């Protein structure tokens, strides 16, 4: 199974959203299994 680095924990929610969004976009650009991970909202919960 593939292992992914956990999303960084940031107390500031706005910064957390930016980190989540940039991580999600990065994985989408890779065109790998992370696309489903992003679609599930694990990275982009707004």
Image (cartoon, rainbow, N blue to C red):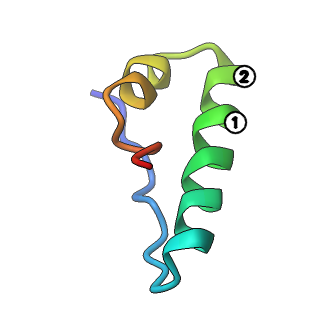
x, y (%) of residue 23? 61, 46
Q: Is 4 or 29 nearer to us in this picture?
A: 29
Q: Residues within 10 Å of mark 2 (few under 14, many from 20)?
A: few
Residue at the spot of label 2? 29
The answer to whether 1 is drawn above or below residue 45 in the figure is: above
Q: Residue placed at 36% from the left, 31% from the top?
A: 2
How far across and down, in percent of the image, does residue 28 sit?
A: 63, 23
Labelled disc at residue 26: 1
Q: Residue at x 44, y 49 (%)?
A: 46
| Quadrant containing the N terminus in the rendered view | top left
- Local secondary structure at mark 2: helix
CA gap, disc 1 and disc 2: 5 Å
* Along the viewing direction, whichever of 32 and 2 lies nearer the viewer: 32
Q: Percent position (x, y) of residue 39?
A: 40, 23
**Name of the residue lying farthest toward the bottom:** 11
Label 1: state its secondary structure: helix
Are the residues flagged by discs 1 and 2 in contact, CB closer than 8 Å? Answer: yes
């Amino acid at each position: 199974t593939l292992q992914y680095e956990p999303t960084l924990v940031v107390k500031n929610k706005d910064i957390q959203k930016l980190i989540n969004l940039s991580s999600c976009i990065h994985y989408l650009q890779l065109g790998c299994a992370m696309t489903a991970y992003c679609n599930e909202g694990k990275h982009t919960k707004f």
